[in-house]
Image (cartoon, rainbow, N blue to C red):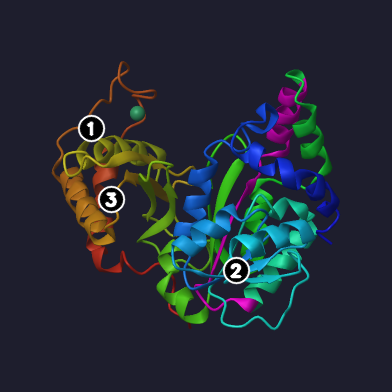
Amino acid sequence: MGREFVGIFDEWAHSYEASVSGKDPEYRDVFKDYENILSEVAKRVSGTVIEFGTGTGNLTAKLIDKGASVIAIEPNKTMRKLTARRFPAIKVIDGDLLQFDAGLDNIDAIVSSYVFHHLTDEEKGAALKKYAELLPPNGKIVFADTAFISEEAKHLQIAKERNRHFHLVADDLEREYYTTIPILMSLFEEAGFQVNFTQMNDYVWLMDASKKGAINMKKMNVESFNLDHTKVAAPFIRLAGTKKGIHGDEIYKYDIRFKQPNKAHMEMPSLHSLEHLMAENIRNHTDQVVDISPMGCQTGFYLSVINHTDYDDILTILEKTLQNVLDATEVPACNEVQCGWAASHSLEGAKEIAAEMLAKKDEWRQIYQEEA
Ligand SMILES: [Zn+2]
């Protein structure tokens, strides 16, 4: 129940500080940018914050610095003593990720670092559901922990550590319940959270989750990660995801939907010409485009922009770009030197799609069908 590794921590308590500061070569990659990782967790929460597995109190210190009111929940007696001694003013409770005083009230956020993998995936799901009951709408969970893109990536990492004789780390990876990003994503979503993942080093990912709520759902529709394609109303322009880099740069990804999913689609030559025309012209209206590419289902495009957070401006930029498509006299770069299938183009088709999209401009902000 999340306590089976408590004994290991007893041995570890005295050497933990050496590990996190990079003095233990085996754990250097795991704790790379440790201070920054903790700061990222701390800066995303405020108010009354539960911290699970406070350890020696490194994250606790950053939370207190930020003005948070911390409730420390720690199963290890040695660690509890250390934390209580270091921060005499905060509440330190005996408990773990799954079992703790359920009487806790008015919690704004739940955080932890290097802890969540102590639970099996099944327990992780149960814990997240418990946290959802504790948190208000928009309440946050921010965890920093080791996770992997896939099972294969995990096995490769274990092999890499064995190869360089870092058997402590490899054993740890095999013993505890390190999981994958897709599994974590579905566990958070099943518990009613919207979650974003950011990779912090070779091991650690930041999981930043907000509890969805009735009011929140309506307001946050544009950011919904789990898109039900039967519920949308094309055309629309929807924020599909955000990603923040370790230096603070932000990528915003939009779903530019031209056609109703599973009802209509764009023909390939028209879609292809539209891609060339938009890719070339949109960059005349902003220098913040990372990429604009067609969806394989031929119903829309993805647009990614960097450090551009203004949804209304995105609509303006797209309107201007589609106007350029209407005004075009030729498809740029539709030759065998500059394109991979120069024979598959239709300027007229692209113009038709652009004209239809522009005619429905007042529908772009409405992503979902009205409830019947
Ligand atoms: Zn092409």
Instruction: Report the side of 333 relative to 205 (left or right).
Output: left
**Of the residues under marks 1 and 2, which one precedes in the sequence?**
2
Ligand 1: quadrant of the figure: top left
Work out whether residue 166 or residue 344 is closer to the camera in this orientation and state it.
166
Residue 86 spot, x, y in % from top left: 60, 60
Q: What is the number of the mark on residue 138?
A: none
> Label 2: which residue?
88
Q: Which residues make up the magenta segment?
A: 134-162
**Mark in the foreground, 2 or 3:** 2
SS class, disc 1: loop
CA gap between label 1 and label 2 equals: 69 Å
Q: Amino acid at mark 3?
A: His
Does residue 53 sit above or below 306 in this rendering?
below
**Of the residues under marks 1 and 3, which one precedes in the sequence?**
3
Q: Amino acid at mark 1?
A: Val
CA gap between label 1 and label 3 equals: 28 Å
CA gap between label 2 and label 3 equals: 43 Å
Q: Amino acid at mark 2?
A: Pro
Residue 23 spot, x, y in % from top left: 63, 31
**Mark in the foreground, 1 or 3:** 3
- Which residue shows up at 80% across the image and 59% down it? 2
Q: Mark 2 vs ligand 1: CB under 8 Å?
A: no
SS class, disc 3: loop
Residue 231 spot, x, y in % from top left: 50, 69
Picture quarter containing residue 275?
top left
Does residue 114 sit above or below 188 in this rendering?
above
Instruction: Report the side of 10 relative to 315 (left or right).
Output: right
SS class, disc 2: loop
Q: Is residue 161 magenta?
A: yes
